[in-house]
Image: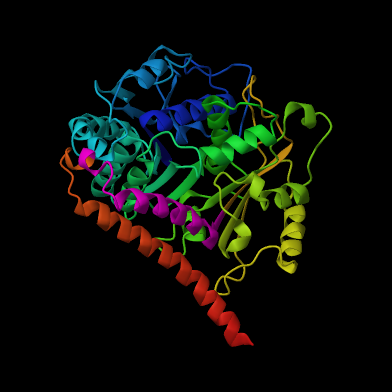
Amino acid sequence: MREIVSLHIGQAGIQIGNACWELYCLEHGILPDGTKNPDVKDTDSMPSTFFLETGGGKFVPRTVLVDLEETVVDEVRKGRFKNLFHPESLISHREDASNNYARGHYTVGKELIDPVLERIRKVTDHCDGLQGFFVFHSFGGGTGSGLGALLLEHLGRDYGKKSKFEFAVYPASTIATAVVEPYNSVLTTHATMDQADCTFMVDNEAIYRICRDKLNVDRPNYSNLNRMIAQVVSSITLSLRFSGSLNVDLTEFQTNLVPFPRIHFPLISYAPILAHSRALHEQSTVSEITAGCFESSSQMLQCEPTSGKYMACCLLYRGDVIPKDVNNVILKFKASSTIQFVDWCPTGFKIGINHKAAVVVPDSEVAAAQRSLCMLTNTTSISEVWRRLDIKFDLMFAKRAFVHWYVGEGMEEGEFSEAREDLAALEKDYMEVDAESIADEADEY
């Protein structure tokens, strides 16, 4: 079996985890106590990728949830799914990281890393053929950034050849939960650059807009946002959990989406996102949901896709979709000038089709769709996310504002400059990909 171990770090990581496991259970017909729902008969389901089935017929998530303070983990311990998770997989500490990367990485986080690694070892011992890890965390918080980076470093050392995928909440352009988010995010991006094989980024503002504009939720809360993220994670992992006509394996994602090791940050889009009021009289065609995914309003991260060029595009269809319709749509998009690929990657499209239609949580604002699409694109336009972040970092670091809090936790000031230089290099990497393409176009004339 090809198992995946999910690691949820810090408040954002755990709360996204809650939404994901809630959805996985619904999709696989698993009840909140881990037993199989006798009313659900699904022959295509492969829950063992994400769940360990015990001798007593109980399904236990292959996961570890970690936070440096107890509040969020205690909510899981006392919540609706308290009997789903193995109690030893819920790990918390007494003091939090105070939005400080250095506390999560060097001081408080260091106290917790050994028990976390030991628990991960026990979870992986129950895997016959571990495929890799999914790490869920935010880049802006202290635990998600610092402990998340520390954990990825250890995973790289202990499980070198295994795939490591990040689902990262990146700081939004206008909404901030902490003043020092730019520091934490730049430090984490640098620390995890060589550790993660592929990083799927989302920002709360983009998903907030989706909930507000498409689902008519006036004041979206984290539960709304996390359930939206869970739908995306479900689509990305669907072919690992259900057999389909065109399955996409984890290593295939890397091969098709990551042309160079550092250029590993795909942009996620999802369509259709329908409120219940619209779903009653709307069923989108394959052509409509594909066109919908190329609109910036369907993106999980704020950037302008038309400002850059595509290096790769992975289209993950689910539900009532037939290959002929997909082929016709792809031919239409290739013929139009809607999307521009870099010239060294002329084909660019990777297709996945799975006939398991999207499932929604009963009290969710999102309506179930007959067919849906999750699109993953590697595009040079994503570099504007770092450009925005770097400007904020520079404004604070020029005054050395808040730096003493990090140095006081044993971090050297030089690490700030080193991390900032790495992000400047990352921006340059993306510019060069774009520039090479422009230069080649000029040569053609």
Q: Is residue 374 above or below residue 274?
A: below
Residue at position x 54%, y 43% from top?
236
At 54% from the left and 80% from the top, the residue drawn is 439
Can you give x and y, in whole percent of width and height, for residue 162 in the image?
A: 34, 49
| Dominant SS type (magenta) | helix
Q: In the rendered view, how is the structure colored?
A: rainbow
The mark tally for this picture is 0
Toward which corner of the image does residue 127 lie, by quadrant? top left
Which residue is rendered at x = 45% and y = 27% of the image?
A: 15
Q: What is the quadrant of the C terminus in the image?
A: bottom right
Answer yes or no: is residue 81 visible. Answer: yes
Q: Position of residue 270 (x, y in %)?
A: 63, 43
| Rendered location of residue 246, percent (x, y) | 62, 50
Can I make out residue 318 in this image? no
On the image, which quarter does residue 372 sit in?
Answer: top right
Which image quadrant is residue 401 in?
Answer: top left
236 left or right, relative to 386? right
The reply, left or right, for residue 339 in relation to residue 437 is right
Q: Is residue 399 magenta?
A: yes
In-front residue for pair 339/247: 339
Q: Which residues are magenta?
A: 377-405
Q: Is residue 145 left or right of residue 304?
A: left
* Spot occupied by residue 109 in the image (x, y as percentages of width and height): 23, 33
